[in-house]
Amino acid sequence: MANTILKKEQLIPGQTSKLVIDAPHIAAKAQPGNFIILRVNEKGERIPLTIADTDRENGTITIVYLVLGKSTALLEELNEGDDILDLCGPLGKATHIQKGGTVICVGGGTGIAAMHHIAKGHHMAGNHVVAVIGARNKDLLLFEKELKSFCPEVLISTDDGSYGHKGLVTELLKDRLEKDKSVVEVVAVGPVPMMAAVSKTTEPFGVPTTVSLNSIMVDGVGMCGACRVTVGGQTKFACVDGPEFDGHKVDFQELRQRLAAFSPMEKESYDHHCRCKCNDSK
Amino acid sequence: MTASKKTIAKRVPMPNQPPDVRRNNFDEVALGYTKEMAMEEAKRCLQCKKPKCVKGCPVEVPIPDFIAHLAKGDVEKAYAVIKSTNSLPAVCGRVCPQEIQCEGACILNAKEQPVAIGRLERFTADEYMHMDACDLITAKPECPYIDQDRKVACIGSGPSSLTVAGYLAARGCKVTVFEALHEVGGVLVYGIPEFRLPKEKIVAKEVGALKELEVEFVTNYVGGKTFNIEDLFEQGYKAVFVGVGAGLPKFLRIPGENFNGVFSANEYLTRVNLGRAYEFPNYDTPIIKGRKVTVYGGGNVAMDAARTAQRLGAESVHIVYRRTADAMPARHEEIEHAVEEGIHLEVLSNPIEFRGDERGNLTSVLLQRMELGEPDASGRRSPKPVEGDVYELETDLAVIAVGTNPNPVLLENEPGLKLNKWGYIEVDEATGETSIPNVYAGGDIVTGAATVILAMGAGRRAAKEIAHRFGIED
């Protein structure tokens, strides 16, 4: 239970990293769709991160994070051989996977890594997985190689056209849905506006759409309700009822507002951290 | 006055931090008796032949016995007596609702003030915190031999599990406690605030004493997720105690409840207590510091949330409750303390809608004025709305403290556990055993939200049965 970082890879230098962590007890139970909660040090905040991959044989899990605030900045300071103080999981409901045909898995930004685990689950179940991934430019695109290792098709878009289709993932998705009637499900993981756009895109086609939500959480085991989200007019807890929900029913507007609930404090905390670091180095 | 009628001295008051000081800090409110005060108070006890107080105690502490030792100044013996049935006296002395338990049953309560049993228990435990840990638990001079084959697992590390662990470890069992969060203590750590139950001084001490008895604590392990009950039996555990707490917070089911600034009491208190958010940004967990705070509910949790908000610098704190103050289920002392600290009780009032701005931040609450109607079947006058009397109260932080529902994390993943009609675990009343043999349960996951001491009573019941089946007790 040392939670040792066995491998660290900077996917986008200074911004996004991948950690392979020794956690056999979590790896043994983890399913696609699950997440973990971690804490970097004694004064740290509990933060949820989706499991991007699991290796049961070697007893490891993989997480990918974007350095966005103090907690992820602290995580980024850890290196191979370091231990993560607290690591708890696997949490949340596993992705509902059944064999049915073609599944399109859409990923944006860091969400591509989380989507990867779900796509893999669908692949293992025998579904034809089409991955659609997007980023602002070529250098920011994650997990292309990993997805290509099992997805028969990987469609790519970038905002600036530096790689693949110039434009949005939703354009690729719409195009595909128009041509291919065998699609039984669309999965989307990424920034809230992207998941909202994907859900809007699939709605006219009547294709069931699953989104994986990254709500604010504290305990992650159903105790606090910080992660509550309105789905089909009902309050659900992302940590125990989700994190995956029917994208056609999620109130994305509310989700976006709730994600901003602590933003002034998150900024304060990050600035405080950076100031302290600067003072230390003086 | 005749010679046969002894005058009963007045109850010795508890020294407290003054309200205008304590409302600005998280230090403990009650300062505790001195030895002189404790001995004086102990002498008020009539030493009844058939003590009613003991019957009023869920773990049946031999109250007159420990008080008799205390009256003579023998704290050590007093401690041994309490510890014979109560694993966490420093906690109970602080958080038990004594007025409806031991002190409520005290014979003096009829005409005078009852003996301050809770304060005496607290004094005794605090005086002994410096003693060797094994003495603390067992009241015996040396640690018992721990039989590594008598393996018992507790799921959850709150008061019920700690009681099971203390009881069985003292009798030579090897106990492992699995906790989902990163810190041990359950509600004692995430729920009850520092100013009512100090974490380092009290909770960590009680837990540390259990470690001396080879009780192993495994944090970040979630029953139903990281492991299942079956896994535990495969690993050689002979008995499993489920004490995972009630969990899932209830909301009010009124419009606007998901605005930023509306918190469940669980979230609010967990951020502040477990996350130490009152020390943000030195600690990383943030909390919204409300200017005009409203709290919904009338129990201990509502009082804790209101008093926490006060300490975080709120301009005003209103506790909104639909009945009258005398019907609030909180400990009397908590309500008294809250009012002393300047918290306003907005009674006979019921929330009907939260309002917010365009960014989704809470700005106010609409309240329905209530009045007491005719007595219902239970004899209580139930509140009913005063027609047309709806008013708006400005609020930027609302904390909802109206109870909890069963937490699904363990239950969903253990289909073999039979539940009652409210969704809590069904247990045998006499033993605490669930529908799965050698799996016991107790505390809030069985009863729904209740008190620390009732959870401890349930833990004790299960521990006794486990000890009995191991053949180490009749």
Image: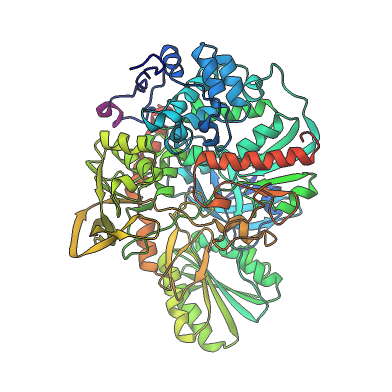
- In which quarter of the view is residue B66 placed? top right
Of A35 and B98, nearer the camera is B98
Of A117 and A164, nearer the camera is A117
**Residue occupying image coordinates x 55% and y 12%:** B74
Residue B20 shown in magenta:
yes
A4 relative to B169, above or below:
below
Indicate left or right for B212 with B82 as reference.
right
What is the magenta segment's predominant secondary structure? helix
- In which quarter of the view is residue B389 placed? bottom left
Indicate left or right for B76 with A46 as reference.
right
Task: State which region is magenta.
Answer: B19-23
**Residue occupying image coordinates x 38% and y 34%:** B279
- The image position of residue A94, as x and y in percent, is 61, 64
- The image position of residue B208, as x and y in percent, is 60, 27
Of B404 and B292, nearer the camera is B404
Residue B181 shown in magenta:
no
Indicate left or right for B28 with B418 as reference.
left
> Is residue A114 in view from this perspective?
yes
The N terminus of chain B lies in quadrant: top left
> Is residue B359 in view from this perspective?
no
- The image position of residue A116, as x and y in percent, is 60, 64
B195 relative to A138, above or below:
above
The C terminus of chain B lies in quadrant: top right
- In which quarter of the view is residue A3 placed? top right
B275 relative to B7, above or below:
below
**Residue occupying image coordinates x 64% and y 29%:** B210
Count of numbered labels shown in the rendering: 0
- The image position of residue B250, as x and y in percent, is 43, 57
